[in-house]
Image (tube, helix red, strand yellow):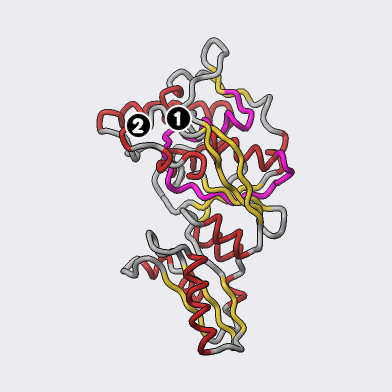
Amino acid sequence: MKIVMACDSFKEAVSAKHACQAIKKGVQQVFPQAEILQLPMADGGEGTTEALIDASQGVYYTVEVQGPLGEKIQARYGILGDGKTAVIEMASASGIHLIEKEDRNPLLTSTYGTGQVIKACLDRGVRSFILGIGGSATNDGGAGMAQALGYRLLDIEGQEIPFGNQGLSHLDRIDCQTIHPGLEHAIFKVACDANNPLCGPQKGASPEMIEKLDANLEHFSRLIYRDLNREVAHIAGSGAAGGLGAGLLAFTSAKHKRGIDIVIETVNLKTALQDVDICFTGEGQIDFQTQYGNPLLESCN
C-alpha cells in the first residue's frame, strides 16, 4: 500500500511538516507495512521554504541582511536537495512581522534585505530561484532589492536615492553598469497569487499616504520603461508585495506563477499521486476557497 501525506500548514497550530508527521504516526499504527511519502505543501507564502526544503532534503542557511527599516537581522533561505535551486521568502528579510505595528510606514520600508539574500545566493553560484513574496512590509516597487543587486538608482545629481517608496520621488535615472554578473543567467520563479496592478492600497498605508505612494510608483514605472524598456505597471501581479512583483519583472528574468503550482511542480506531487492508494491532505481552514488552492484537488484536476 502506498500512502501520501500532502498537508498545508494549520496556521497558529502546526506546520505542514508536523501535520504530515502526525498523520504518518497514526497511519503506521494501522498499516505498519505501508510505503508512506510525506510531501508538505504550501501556497508560496509563509512555510514555502520549509515545505520545499524538507520535501527535497535540502539545506537551510542564514545571512545577515538589512531589515525593512535598516536594522540588522538574520534572514533564512534554503537550497533544494538538487543543490542548485534557492528558495527564498521575502518576508524573512522584508516582512511586515519584523516591524512593530506603530512603526510600520510604507514610505520608508525597503526590500534591500531581500536583494541581499538573492545576492548571497548568486555569490554561492546559485542561478535558479523560487521566491515567495507574501507578507511584505514594503511599498518600494522592489527598488531596494535592485540596489542590493547592483543597480544604481540615481537622482538628478547622480547620487543614490534614499531607500523606501519616499526615495522614488527623487529618481532621475536607472544605471545598469554595476549589476551582479550572475543575474544574466539567473532564472526566477515568483510565487504570486495576487492579480493587483502596481498602484493601489497597501498594508500599513493610511488613506492620505496612498496618493503619494501611487505617484512615486507611477514615476518609478515610467523610468523602468524608459531606461530598461520593460512595461510593468499594468501587468497582473505587479503590485504584489508592495510592488516587488513589478521590481522582479523589471530587474530580473522573473516569471510569475501561482504559488501552489510551483510547490506541486517542485515536489513532483502529480507523479507521487499516480499509483497512490490513499492521500491525506488538509489545511488550517476548510471553506469554499479550498477547492481553488488545495494541493490534492489541484493535482487531480
The magenta stretch spans residue 10: no
| Residues at marks 1 and 2 touching, judged by CB atoms closer than 8 Å | yes
What is the magenta range? Answer: 123-152
Placement of the N terminus among the 4 image quadrants = bottom right
Inspect the image, locate mark 1, and give the three-letter code of the amino acid beneath it. Answer: Leu
Seen in the picture, residue 218 relative to 27 is either above or below; the reply is above
| Residue 121 visible at all | yes
Give the quarter of the image for residue 269: bottom right
Give the quarter of the image for residue 209: top left
Q: Describe the element under mark 1 as helix, strand or loop.
A: loop
Looking at the image, residue 275 sits to the left or right of residue 134; the answer is right
* Residue shown at the point (74%, 44%) measured from the top left: 125
Looking at the image, residue 38 sits to the left or right of residue 296; the answer is right
- Circle 1 is placed at which residue position? 69
Inspect the image, locate mark 2, and give the three-letter code of the amino acid beneath it. Answer: Asp
| Residue 251 visible at all | no
- Give percent across and percent down for residue 173: 55, 20
Seen in the picture, residue 104 relative to 186 is either above or below; the reply is above
- Circle 2 is placed at which residue position? 103
- Give percent across and percent down for residue 129: 63, 49
